[in-house]
Amino acid sequence: MPPTAGEALPQGRPRRRVLLPLPLAGAYDYRVPEDLDPPELGAFVQVPLGGRETIGVVWDGDADPNLPERRLKNITAVLDVPPMTATLRKFVDWVAAYTVSPPGAVLRMAMSSPSALEPPAAKAGWRLSAAGRAVLARGGKVTPTRMRVLEALEGELSQGDANEAHLATTIASAAGVSSGVLRGMAEAGLLEPALIARAAEFPVPDLRKQGPALAEDQQVAGAALRQAVATRGFGVTLLQGVTGSGKTEVYLEAVAECLAQGRQALVLLPEIALSAQWLERFEARFGCPPALWHSELGSRRRRDTWRGVAEGRVQALVGARSALFLPFPDLGLVVVDEEHETSFKQEEGVIYSARDMAVVRARLNEAACVLVSATPSLETLNNAETGRYASLNLPVRHGGATLPKVSTIDQRVTPPERGRFLSPPLVQAVRDAIGRGEQAMLFLNRRGYAPLTLCRTCGHRMRCPNCTAWLVEHRIQRRLQCHHCGHAEPIPPTCPECGAEGSLTPLGPGVERVQEEASELFPDVRRLVMASDTLPGPAAAAEAARAIQAREVDLIIGTQIVAKGWHFPHLTLVGVVDADLGLAGGDLRAAERTVQLLHQVAGRAGRAEAPGQVMLQSWNPEHPVMQALISGDLEGFMAAEADQRRPGHWPPFGRLAALIVSGEDERETDAIARDLGLEAPGGEGVEVLGPAPAPLALLRGRHRRRLLIKVRRDVAVQPILREWLSRVRVPASVKVQVDVDPVSFL
Ligand SMILES: Nc1ncnc2c1ncn2[C@@H]1O[C@H](COP(=O)(O)OP(=O)(O)OP(=O)(O)O)[C@@H](O)[C@H]1O
Ligand SMILES: [Zn+2]
């Protein structure tokens, strides 16, 4: 019988498989030395690797008994952290297998705060010595100042434990003395030095607090979600509801139930930086803010949160997609808000969909999963229709508010004046709304001043040297910028091609240009531009939201960040400057995505008493997307989308995966792409398209080619991909990325 993990091999010490957070093919075997207790599965261990020490996790599976003893290295240390749970280990393996990535690359995402693995840093402080306590108990000769210090330590600071140490500054300020007094007391033996362990504190949500009284349909949905959580088993529920129907309040019921069960709750939001209003809502409901997890978290906060989650001290956490890889010991609920958002797809490194992996994590944790949207993706709708997901619906806005009236402005009939971008009916509507004391919003999903700069003399277009992309003018910064690689250059005074002076002209609008036009049309109106580069961070976005709510702003001009779940009660008019924008390029989901985005923006209008109005400037008002937005019949639109995709086995009725081949050398990149094309798999229900230059054929100086494989739904694509990749030898200078269920086709 072969020896199993944990059992000592006859010839020596026990062995362990250790997975390292590196893109290696699999786990490595290590030996447990004499002076170490054999670590359990999931333990974080320090091991040598190629001349340095690194940290890994004791992984499932058996060590290779045939590996000779002399080739094994020793585990150096076992870290004092809760071991990675079996469910998280399974999740790492599952994500790796699904995305065709090395497990170590996925593990890396679950070890995103290396310093959290070290013991919490202790700080030097002071506490009462035996002599000090004696003085307090029996009295003694000390100055009144020193007495104040002793009393502060025993009383005000003690919180039930008069033996606890505190920072010198804390004691000094509590007793109203200088820190010199403390040093003197230490010399006199009244205080003694001690270390303060600094486990960060996380506020505990107050479950006795009640949320707002729910309307009847909200109550029904809330109860169903509570029920789903209370079963303590796996299940997915789609919570669909029109914009402003109170979906957030309803799923906070599920969060409350989960916390009442003593389990941890995770809410994924597409854009944490823009979630000030959401955080306020959570705090109003539970009396304290949730823990946060996103890329801008400072390293200290990151470490504390990671530890707090692992030790079960964090009960509710709201985060970006990477929060899925946190070490929750007992996750009871995962909510994905705005589940249709494409930003849930990670496009770098391990390419994965956080929406889909949330479902997997919930399944492994025996947890409830709730997908929330006013405009669910076709994938999710399909899962609801076929009964894989339960489905709840909130058909009306909360508090008697009505859905806004949507109309188009035909740009062929009433175009803007030459060189302008706002047509007369829209201009009039903005004037009227603001005249009534209401707020208006102009939406254009494009940052900067102009998307293209052209020489009027020779026709030269300013393009990025590193990417297949035009440079976007940012007039405020007086620069041309590439939105793909960050390349920036000053706007040249003459055309770099023909040398003509003053001949470079901006073409087309970005939000900055709409703002310029608005400043001429409505000079007395208080305007605010909301774009990711004008609101660089959570604080700026929160301040913008506050100013709008406080009615310090009349006209909001913004990119897609204005579409995100905001609730501005006085906003009644939304004007979409270019409703056709997302339809160009035409990937698989262009129409679906445009409907989702525009419906989301439209949903910002008329959320309180005053009714809302939405105007879409379009060159093609007959387009099914515009018609769906006007009629509000999104269900019919999605049904038609499904009918288009079904016959060709396009997602969700079939599966896609993309291979993206990239390299600095164009010929070499082409050669590998061609080899992959020659080795393309075939057979029943399998189809390969490409290789072809990617739409972004050059990105950050790398040439890119794409291949797309489409398989029938009943065919597993991962084994085909693995086999395919194993047949082509790829040099280190060329990268082949695998994108299963691609969302971006660039
Ligand atoms: N039962 C209720 N009592 C009081 N206020 C409520 C209730 N339900 C919802 N609201 C309020 O109505 C507003 C809209 O609710 P919420 O933002 O949850 O809607 P939503 O469905 O998430 O909308 P969207 O999809 O547009 O983001 C919020 O200000 C919310 O606090
Ligand atoms: Zn670029």
Image: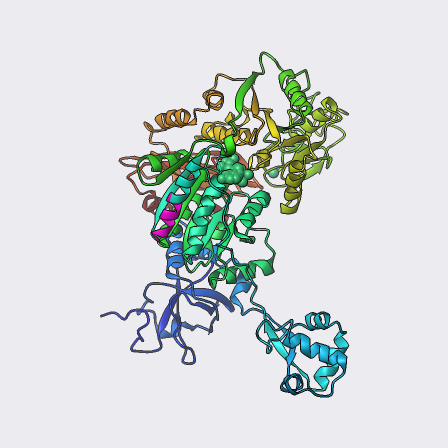
- Where residue 59 sits, quadrant-wise, is bottom left
In depth, the one of 241 and 398 nearer the eye is: 398
Q: Quadrant of ligand 2?
A: top right
Q: Which residues are magenta?
A: 224-232
Residue at x 66%, y 28% (from the top left corner)? 450
Q: Using the image, determine if residue 115 lies above or below residue 220.
A: below
In this rendering, position of residue 60 left or right of residue 421 = left
In depth, the one of 224 and 56 nearer the eye is: 224
- Magenta highlight on residue 225: yes
Residue at x 34%, y 45% (from the top left corner)? 718
- Magenta highlight on residue 523: no
Whole-percent x, y for residue 501 in the image: 77, 25
- Where residue 495 sits, quadrant-wise, is top right
In depth, the one of 65 and 147 nearer the eye is: 147
Q: How is the image coloured?
A: rainbow
Q: Using the image, determine if residue 87 lies above or below residue 66.
A: above
Look at the image and tell me whether residue 736 can be seen: no
Whole-percent x, y for residue 30 in the image: 40, 70
Look at the image and tell me whether residue 551 can be seen: yes
In this rendering, position of residue 245 left or right of residue 152 = left
In depth, the one of 640 and 224 nearer the eye is: 224
**Quadrant location of the N terminus?**
bottom left
Q: Residue furthest top?
A: 413
Whole-percent x, y for residue 371 in the image: 42, 42
Q: Using the image, determine if residue 596 lies above or below residue 159.
A: above
Residue at x 55%, y 24% (from the top left corner)? 579
State the count of labels.
0
Magenta segment, prevailing SS (helix, strand or loop) = helix
Whole-percent x, y for residue 281 in the image: 55, 45
